[in-house]
Image: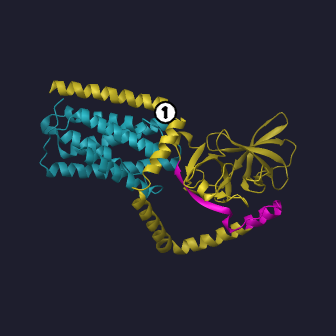
Amino acid sequence: MFRQLNFAIVHGTIALLLGVTLLLSSANTNLTQRLSDFSERALRLPEFPAFTARRIVAKAVFWFDQGLNLKEELEVLRDENVKLKVLLAARQGDVKLGESDMLTAEITLRRPEDWWEKFRINKGSKEGIRPGFAVLNNGFLVGRVYKVSAHQAWVRLLTGLEMMVPAVVSETRDLGVVAGDGKGSLRLLYIPSESPVASGMNIETALVNEYLPAGLPIGTVGGVLEEKDGYSVFVVKSKAQLSRMYQVQIYIPSGGEK
Amino acid sequence: MIINSLLMWFLQDLLQVFLRGWMLIPDFMLMFVCYKSITSNYGLSRMIWIAFVGGLCWDLRWAGILGLNALAYTVALILSFWFWNLMPKNGRTPVILAAVMLMGHLTVAVFRLIILGIPSHYLLYQVALQQSYAVVLSIIFGFVFYKRGNKSNAPQA
């Protein structure tokens, strides 16, 4: 009996040490990411029944339980969509959004330690996604695609420390940069202190490249965070549901799809 | 035992896929392994490695951090086994078993929160709900233990 217990203590200690070693050495490495992607691919077939059941249940809930509410919501969203398209067309003459310009993708992995930095979606190059494409939620820019494989892609969030997006305040045409603080908040930088930018004004993207066109809504201006060297830093209020994102829309520019 | 644990893991995975975004599934693969280590005479060493590998597979599939759940599952299993064996034999009731299993499950949740922090209040709410489902599962395991006549073949510490 004691021999068995001693064995258990040895095995338990080895398992604990191995666990600690893995935990300390594997966090945020490419190998972990690759292994994680591989396991997702390997389990795709055995998990297929659950995915199918989920889709059926989601559809049933959609049609039977929330039909009326969703219909009303759909109307509002349709109006917003039309408004968005008009805004885009007005802001940027050469970009025309068609029916297939927005691709909906599900978030399949959002690692807690990178919560405000990045996440993975279930659409990839086979669906026409390329690095640099804009990612929206609730009609507002939340990030950009930075890594793409055949059936999945990684998105870098606007709230992360590594993302900066040139932006313009719609009402005053002041140019600045929207950046994240790594803790879930957005800031608007480099706005001259004498500028008339005020709380409640709309912020949208300034032209960066063909993948991230001008006029994509980012949020609205909040209060002044600080003033330094003649420039103000404003809080940006995004209407995207950054903490409760399950789906996102990928903006595929004309000619971007395969 | 390994096949049963694998099936439990797969069932847990399927339910997580099915309910992703709606709720967090309790770790019933861990609860199953804890239950078996407490009530059966499978070697604890073997159970430790089953829990470790199960946690590691969960890390690969869902957490994206190798070692997080592997370590948590191992700690939870060892703690559960230890607490159970602290009890005198006549005190090992179904209620105590349910409490020990719930404690094991709670250990994993607390461990994850310590390592990962609390990304949002919504997630914290989901973790709290997950623990409430674990309470139900613990009661079920306690009931099974009761129906089987409170037999514990586990080696004594």
Residue A230 appears in which quarter of the rendering?
A: top right
Quadrant containing the C terminus of chain A in the rendered view:
bottom right
Report x, y in % for residue A206: 79, 51
Dot 1: few (<14), some (14–19), or many (≥20) neighbours within 10 Å? some
Indicate the chain coloured yellow by its letter.
A
Does the stretch in magenta take in A17? no
The stretch of residues the image draws in magenta is A83-109
Residue at the extreme front: A258
Rendering colour (chain B): cyan
Q: Is residue B50 above or below residue A240?
A: above
Quadrant containing the N terminus of chain A in the rendered view:
top left
Q: Is residue A39 visible?
A: yes
Instruction: Write the residue at 35% across / 42% down.
Output: B54
Does the stretch in magenta take in A97? yes
Left or right of residue B19, residue A90 in this image: right
Instruction: Write the residue at 74% across / 67% down.
Output: A83
Which residue does the numbered mark 1 point to in the structure image?
Answer: A26
The chain that hosts pointer 1 is A
Left or right of residue A130, residue B85 in this image: left
Report x, y in % for residue A14: 33, 27
User: As rendered, which of B57 and B133 lies closer to the eye?
Assistant: B57
**Secondary structure under badge 1?**
helix
Report x, y in % for residue A54: 44, 62
Instruction: Write the residue at 27% across / 48% down.
Output: B138
Number of marks in picture = 1
User: As rendered, which of A148 and A17 lies closer to the eye?
Assistant: A148
Left or right of residue B136, residue A255 in this image: right
Report x, y in % for residue B26: 36, 49
Q: Is residue B117 visible?
A: no
Residue B2 appears in which quarter of the rendering?
A: top left
User: As rendered, which of B65 and A74 lies closer to the eye?
Assistant: B65
- Indicate the amino acid at tag 1: Ser
